[in-house]
Amino acid sequence: MRVSAKSDYALRVLFHLTEVYQGEQTRPVSIRTLAERNDIPRRFLEHIMIDLRSRGWVRSIAGREGGFVLGMDPDQITMGQVIRHFEGYIAPIECVSATNYQACSQQPRCKFRRVFLEIRNLTAAVMDRATLALVASGKPVVHCVVADETYADGAGI
């Protein structure tokens, strides 16, 4: 599964807002700050913020000291919800997607489709458990973890 820039940027902003979240005491973050600190083109971010606001995930506050805050508790928003909203589905290929299903001519005899179905189910389960609050409480992933020797022989990982 590949995540689009739109999903990536939406998650960056949501995690930024999660890090500053203090319930009703949260101070709004300007769109300028969100764009600069998260390395997002401002015009693109404006469209993303409209989407996030339409879902109730963020609220906009007008005025000179205005900006954006989370629209709900970060325990109530999952990465799975965000990815599904922006991507439409989580499945790695269409023939195992529930919402973007496309039949394949090889379906009656395809054996490897089951592996992609398992990947879809595992990915969805992990993302649906990954609330903004839970993920934000973890540590950033460093390169040495990504390049773990265990998987080094798997070109393209």
Image (cartoon, grey):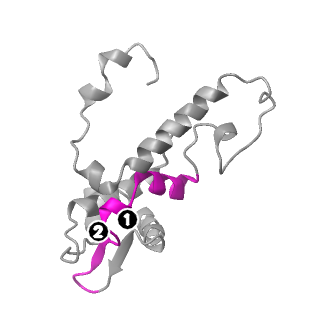
Q: Amino acid at mark 2?
A: Arg
Magenta stretch: give its range.
Answer: 63-88
Q: Which of the 4 image quarters holds residue 26? A: bottom left
Let me know if residue 133 is in the magenta part.
no
Residue 32 tag number: 2
The reply to whether discs 2 and 1 touch (Cβ–Cβ < 8 Å) is: yes
Packing grade of label 1 (10 A; few <14, some 14-19, many >=20) is some
Of residues 43 and 76, the one drawn nearer to the viewer in this rendering: 76
Q: Quadrant of residue 139?
A: top left
Residue 122 seen in the figure: yes
- For the C terminus, the quadrant is top left
Instruction: Name which of mark 2 and mark 1 comes first in the sequence.
Output: 2
What amino acid type should be assigned to the residue bearing mark 1? Arg
Residue 13 shown left or right of residue 7 in the figure: left
Disc 1 element: helix
Q: Residue furthest top?
A: 153
The residue that label 1 is drawn on is 42
Residue 109, given in percent of the width and then of the height, sits at 78, 23
